[in-house]
Image: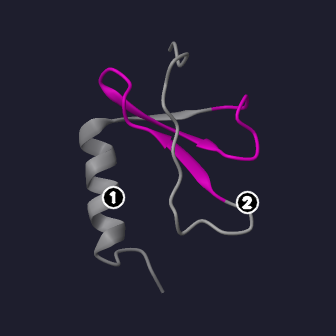
Amino acid sequence: MELTGATWRKSTRSGNGECVEVADDLPGVVGVRDSKDPTGPVLTFDRQAWRSFVTATGNGVGTR
């Protein structure tokens, strides 16, 4: 997948440089990468899967 030109962003709540970056301007997918390794591997999720993940985590699913 071509990721050149993707706009990567991270949460304003990220601290200590330990965060992920998300690119949601890619065609059909959302990219996720480690902000400390911007040239490293990227996970890609289809938009529905990403939406489900964000919704679930926002509702506290998977928290202790």
Decide if residue 38 is on the left or right side of residue 53.
Answer: right
Q: Is residue 11 left or right of residue 51?
A: right
Residue type at tag 2: Gly
Work out which residue is located at the far front of the displayed protein and give it: 12
> What residue do we see at 32% from left, 70% from top?
58
Count residues near mark 2 (Cα–Cα under 10 Å), then give few for <14, some for 14-19, many for 20+. few
Whether residue 58 sits left or right of residue 3 in the image: it is: left
Q: In the rendered structure, which segment of residues is drawn in magenta?
A: 19-41
- Mark 1 secondary-structure assignment: helix
Q: Is residue 5 above or below residue 46?
A: above
The numbered disc on residue 17 is 2
User: Mark 1 — residue?
Assistant: 54
Labels 2, 1: front one: 2
Q: Is 6 located above or below residue 50 in the figure?
A: above
Kind of residue at badge 1: Val
Q: Residues within 10 Å of mark 1 (few under 14, many from 20)?
A: few
Residue 54 location, quadrant: bottom left
For the point 60% across and 65% down, the residue is 14
Nearest the camera: 7 or 21?
Answer: 7
Q: Are marks 2 and 1 in contact (CB under 8 Å)?
A: no
Residue 34 in the magenta stretch? The answer is yes
